[in-house]
Image (cartoon, helix red, strand yellow):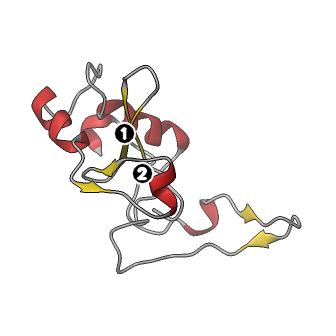
Amino acid sequence: MAPLGMTGATFDWPGKEMPVGHGLRGRPVPASVYPARASGRLHATAADIARFAAAGMAGAPQPVLSAEGIGALHRPVVPVGGLFGVVAEGYALGDFTETLSDSCRAVWHGRAGA
């Protein structure tokens, strides 16, 4: 995370420093911590998440990967079905992919629990 300046990112559970989520009735929802799983283990500030996302874009001001590496990262590997198949065509190396109505390619990740 250091090459991107992600100073607020950590793989350790920051505990009470984390914001508390709330359910539909406004009650706090306890955080789910998955210490043995890679998904959902990186805890970061909104600014750090933005730096991470920007670094994975073509023409990023602070790239970590080459243009070829970014292309490989976003190339669909598996077709998507089920509920996510309604909005995504494929799954790349960590992100969903789709072709927008103007023929531009989009990559995204729900970030819910991951």
Q: Residue at x 61, y 60 (%)?
A: 18
43 lies left or right of 66? right
Q: Position of residue 3 (x, y in %)?
A: 24, 37
Q: Give the answer, above or below, for where 104 lies relative to 26.
A: above
Q: Are the residues at dot 1 and dot 2 in contact (C-beta closer than 8 Å)?
A: yes
Label whose residue precedes the other's in the sequence (1 or 2): 2
- The kind of residue tagged 1 is Phe
Mark 1 = which residue? 52
Q: Residue at x 44, y 49 (%)?
A: 109
Q: Position of residue 99 (x, y in %)?
A: 38, 33
- The residue at the far right in this view is 25
Q: Position of residue 67 (x, y in %)?
A: 15, 27
Q: Tally the marks.
A: 2
Q: Position of residue 10 (x, y in %)?
A: 40, 57
Q: Nearer the viewer, residue 52 or 5?
A: 52
46 lies left or right of 100? right
For mark 2, give the secondary structure.
loop
For mark 1, give the secondary structure.
helix
Q: Nearer the viewer, residue 113 or 35?
A: 113
Badge 2 crowding class, 10 Å Cα cut-off, few under 14, some 14 to 19, many 20 or more, is: some
Label at residue 38: none
Please state, as top left, top right, bottom left or bottom right, where the C terminus lies in the image: bottom left
Q: Residue at x 38, y 66 (%)?
A: 39
Q: Residue at x 36, y 39 (%)?
A: 52
Q: Nearer the viewer, residue 57 or 62?
A: 57
Mark 2 = which residue? 9
State which quadrant residue 108 falls in: top left
State which quadrant residue 74 falls in: top left
- The kind of residue tagged 2 is Ala
